[in-house]
Image (tube, coloured by chain):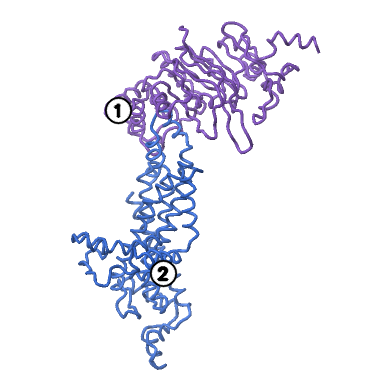
């Protein structure tokens, strides 16, 4: 591991200006990835996982979104404030994205091959010739183990199954040999057997191409299969960040514990799965302290104050007052 | 594909029959005595009665309808009382003028409407969008004939930019009839000056005729572009680093144009109907003006013929639009 992270997001905050007021979607997120690392970003729907990774690379329309602070550095280069054109090159060449629903991420009225060739040419800034791009595309289709690449190249998206389309999208994303892959719930829309195939394929490609990856998911099981580290997001903040084994064996944040309790256990008989009571806080008027306090069994008066990320050890960070020495003192005072 | 076309053509015959029934009934229960009109103002009651029997006006409506259909089946559209010529001959003269005018109007509406819709969507809630929406609201709100009169008054009478009406000036030579569309005929024989004059004569009526269609096309295309630009495949294209022009003009527009196409087909029908008003205002000798004069003088057979021809034109256009749908959307193509 080098000292320079591939991706370094610092104090990143983003709001949406809505009719009802300012919606604080992302609040002071810090996240950094070493080259070759595979990070799982987990959290429930609406916690800001997708928005964070899209906004960092200029994919969230503004307005209504507005980045209110922080920095995003890719290999030491600041991305916030770059022109559209420059960001487009970053997206094409250095960062690749795969999305949730392969059914809707391919354009229905163009052939698969046309879309692949267009993407490959755009990724190279128009440098690649059409026939070269076609050769690359067919090569990539082979790499993602799509049966009969020549035929699929000439097919329209609706003629392909969900799994096949996701393979096409993976081929498209990886054609430019990017450094960073952002996989936004790449298997959520697929059925379980296909899910496993796609995850295997991705793990294989990530290893082969030496990719750094962020995999967004609300499924801890999926993330554990592919990633080495997990960051847990709640209501626009990262609340815990640790290696996969630590998250499963010794989760520190009550929210993470709640998420794990909600997973079915293979050896324990359970009639009902645990759930976390309550719902997400109102991000139009977020409380100053811990956003999870209202749902937290360990909530204490100190939780009403801002809660910084705290290092438990070298690889484990958590934002919770349970690990704040001041908490005991606070209790003693009270 | 061929099966679809044949099926649709078969359906067209049925629909035209329905159209004939309705028009025939309406034209006959409308006030006015066709025998009296045919006989002329000076005819004696005896002569009127004679003509009534001679032309079959005294028979029951269904019988007359049957006779009329028999006549149609032989390709005979009847005779115009007003012009005194066979209706087929009249239509051969007037229809090309209207086709020319309507095609020119459709061209204006599409060539301006589609890009305006795209621009408005891309600049949603900014100045270009506001300006374009103002234009399209005016298009929906202003009656065609009123707009025609205003254009005529201001651009023609006040500023003298365009001719007041007609297809050509009084002293212009009409080019040899090939298609009957003067601008195209003139171009075919290489007479650019006449082609230009003919186009200048069409600018005002075509503007009036195309304005409501333009408005509708803008609105549909704008709404559809807004929707499509928010779709996932647009996000993916942007994530691949594809440039905004390609995304908007190709990736998004090819999807957004589909509902716009349907709108164009519908508006084509409205335009055919609108020619009755616009051709009257601009004294443009087309089938609309012919129909208007025929209707005023209760000239029965021309009314029937014009209605059936415009109906057929509308149906054919929409068949064409459906085929274009299949051309643009592979999902539709697979179903036919």
Dot 1: within a 10 Å radius of its alpha carbon, few (fewer than 14), some, or many (20 or more) residues?
A: many
- The colour assigned to chain B within the rendered structure: blue
> Hey, which quadrant is residue B17 in on the image?
bottom left
**Which chain letter goes with mark 1?**
A
Residue B258 numbered tag: none
Q: Pointer 2: what residue?
A: B20
Q: Which chain is purple?
A: A
Left or right: where A135 falls relative to A263:
left
Image quadrant in which the C terminus of chain A is located = top right
Report the front residue among B136 and A169.
Answer: B136
Residue at image position (26%, 64%) is: B182
Left or right: where A250 falls relative to A55:
right
Residue B260 image position (x, y, % from top left):
42, 49
Q: Is residue B139 above or below residue B116?
A: below
Q: Is residue B73 above or below residue A117?
A: below
Residue B244 image position (x, y, % from top left):
40, 35
Q: Pointer 1: what residue?
A: A134
Residue A111 image position (x, y, % from top left):
35, 35
In the displayed orientation, state which residue is furthest to the left: B189
**Which chain letter goes with mark 2?**
B
Residue at image position (23%, 68%) is: B174
Dot 2: within a 10 Å radius of its alpha carbon, few (fewer than 14), some, or many (20 or more) residues?
A: many
């Amino acid at each position: 591991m080098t000292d320079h992270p591939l991706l370094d997001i610092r104090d990143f905050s983003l709001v949406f200006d809505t009719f009802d007021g300012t919606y604080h979607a992302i609040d002071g997120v810090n996240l950094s990835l070493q080259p070759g690392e595979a990070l799982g970003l987990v959290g429930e729907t609406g916690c800001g996982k997708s928005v964070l990774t899209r906004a960092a690379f200029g994919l969230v329309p503004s307005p209504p979104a507005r980045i209110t602070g922080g920095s995003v550095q890719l290999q030491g280069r600041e991305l916030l404030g770059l022109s559209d054109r420059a960001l487009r090159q970053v997206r094409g060449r250095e960062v690749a994205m795969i999305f949730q629903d392969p059914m809707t991420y391919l354009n229905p009225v163009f052939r698969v091959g046309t879309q692949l060739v267009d993407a490959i040419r755009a990724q190279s800034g128009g440098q690649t010739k059409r026939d070269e791009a076609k050769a690359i595309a067919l090569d990539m289709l082979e790499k993602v183990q799509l049966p009969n690449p020549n035929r699929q190249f000439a097919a329209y998206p609706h003629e392909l199954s969900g799994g096949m389309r996701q393979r096409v999208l993976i081929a498209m994303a990886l054609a430019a040999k990017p450094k960073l892959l952002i996989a936004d719930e790449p298997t959520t829309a697929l059925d379980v057997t296909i899910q496993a195939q796609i995850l295997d394929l991705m793990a294989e490609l990530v290893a082969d191409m030496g990719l750094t990856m962020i995999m967004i998911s609300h499924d801890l099981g999926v993330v554990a299969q592919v990633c080495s580290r997990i960051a847990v997001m709640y209501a626009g903040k990262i609340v815990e960040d640790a290696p996969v084994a630590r998250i499963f064996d010794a989760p520190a944040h009550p929210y993470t514990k709640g998420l794990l309790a909600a997973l079915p256990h293979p050896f324990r008989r359970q009639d009902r799965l645990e759930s976390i009571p309550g719902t997400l806080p109102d991000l139009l008027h977020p409380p100053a302290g811990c956003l999870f306090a209202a749902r937290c069994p360990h909530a204490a008066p100190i939780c009403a104050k801002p809660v910084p990320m705290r290092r438990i050890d070298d690889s484990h960070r958590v934002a919770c007052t349970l690990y704040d020495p001041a908490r005991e003192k606070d209790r003693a005072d009270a | 594909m061929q099966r679809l076309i044949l099926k649709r053509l078969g359906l067209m015959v049925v629909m035209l029959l329905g159209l004939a029934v309705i028009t025939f009934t309406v034209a006959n229960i409308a006030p006015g005595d066709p025998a009296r009109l045919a006989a002329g103002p000076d005819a004696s009651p005896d002569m009127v009665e004679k003509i009534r029997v001679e032309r079959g006006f005294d028979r029951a409506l269904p019988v007359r309808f049957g006779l009329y259909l028999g006549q149609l089946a032989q390709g005979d559209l009847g005779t115009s009382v007003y012009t005194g010529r066979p209706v087929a001959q009249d239509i051969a003269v007037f229809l090309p003028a209207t086709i020319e005018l309507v095609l020119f109007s459709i061209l204006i509406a599409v060539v301006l409407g589609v890009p305006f819709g795209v621009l408005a969507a891309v600049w949603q809630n900014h100045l270009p969008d506001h300006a374009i929406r103002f234009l399209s609201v005016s298009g929906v709100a202003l009656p065609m004939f009123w707009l025609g009169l205003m254009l005529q008054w201001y651009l023609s009478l006040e500023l003298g930019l365009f001719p007041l009406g007609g297809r050509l000036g009084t002293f212009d030579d009409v080019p040899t009839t090939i298609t009957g569309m003067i601008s195209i005929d003139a171009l075919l024989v290489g007479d650019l000056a006449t082609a230009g004059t003919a186009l200048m004569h069409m600018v005002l009526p075509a503007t009036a005729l195309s304005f409501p269609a333009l408005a509708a096309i803008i609105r549909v295309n704008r709404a559809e572009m807004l929707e499509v630009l928010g779709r996932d495949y647009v996000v993916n294209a942007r994530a691949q680093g594809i440039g905004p022009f390609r995304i908007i003009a190709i990736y998004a527009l090819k999807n957004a144009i589909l509902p716009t196409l349907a709108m164009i087909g519908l508006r084509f029908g409205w335009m055919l109907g609108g020619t009755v008003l616009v051709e009257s205002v601009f004294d443009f000798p087309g089938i609309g003006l012919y129909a208007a004069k025929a209707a005023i003088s209760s000239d029965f057979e021309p009314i029937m013929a014009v209605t059936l021809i415009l109906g057929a034109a509308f149906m054919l256009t929409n068949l064409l639009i459906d085929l274009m749908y299949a051309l643009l959307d592979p999902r539709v193509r697979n179903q036919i």
